[in-house]
Amino acid sequence: MVSLDPSGPWSRERADQFLTQTTIPLRLSCRTPAGDPWMLSLWYEWDIENTELRCATSADADVVRFLRAHDDVAFEVSTNDPPYRGVRGRGTATVEPDPEKTVLRRLIGRYLGDEETSLTKRLLSPERDEVTIRIRPSKLHTWDYASRMQSSEMSRH
């Protein structure tokens, strides 16, 4: 395991736990080939052993071309409802083919469960070429506003 201790209130173990258990899509920020900022949301999995985030997308998605032009990225996984908390960071991304859709299949299980849906069938269609995006963080930062938000909530009562 690569040592990458986050800044902020959480230990690496707590950040690992959050990234492993949270099924909120990752927000990924990158640059277009022209250098313009671009952001999108992707399903992800956190590999504690290799200290990397893995996402899946169609091989012809714009982000694939963008990441091949500029591999530096920023990302965030954070709760959408109070109390707000999460992990953000920066690093580099690589794109590699996934002809068996191995990562996508795990992500479907993680985010949708085992249910066969029209979305699942479309994503797993043999006509769809899939890639894996590997994000290797160089910096992690955590935040957790639970105590701050609970105390402000209590002061209103």
Image (tube, rainbow, N blue to C red):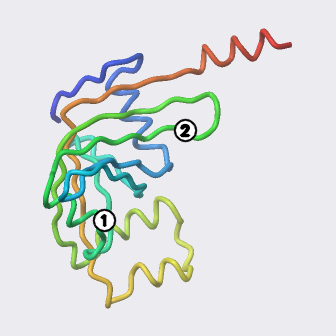
Q: Earlier in the sequence, mark 2 or mark 1?
A: 2
Q: Which residue is mark 1?
A: 103
Kindly indicate the quadrant of the structure image that contains residue 66.
Answer: bottom left
For label 2, the SS is loop
Q: Which residue is mark 2?
A: 79
Residue 141 location, x and y as percent?
34, 26
Q: Is residue 50 above or below residue 65?
A: above
For label 1, the SS is helix
Q: Nearer the viewer, residue 83 or 23?
A: 83
Q: Tell me which residue sits at (29%, 70%) in the image.
A: 102
Q: From the viewer's perspective, tell me whether residue 109 is left or right of residue 38.
A: right
Residue 157 location, x and y as percent?
86, 13
Most extreme residue toward the bottom, as rendered?
Answer: 127
Q: CA distance from mark 2 to mark 1?
A: 23 Å
Q: Of discs 2 and 1, which sits in the foreground?
A: 2
Q: Tell me which residue sits at (29%, 23%) in the image.
A: 6
Q: Amino acid at mark 2?
A: Thr
Residue 130 location, x and y as percent?
27, 75
Q: Is residue 151 above or below residue 28?
A: above
Q: Is residue 150 above or below residue 69?
A: above
Most extreme residue toward the right, as rendered?
Answer: 157
Q: Tell me which residue sits at (82%, 13%) in the image.
A: 156
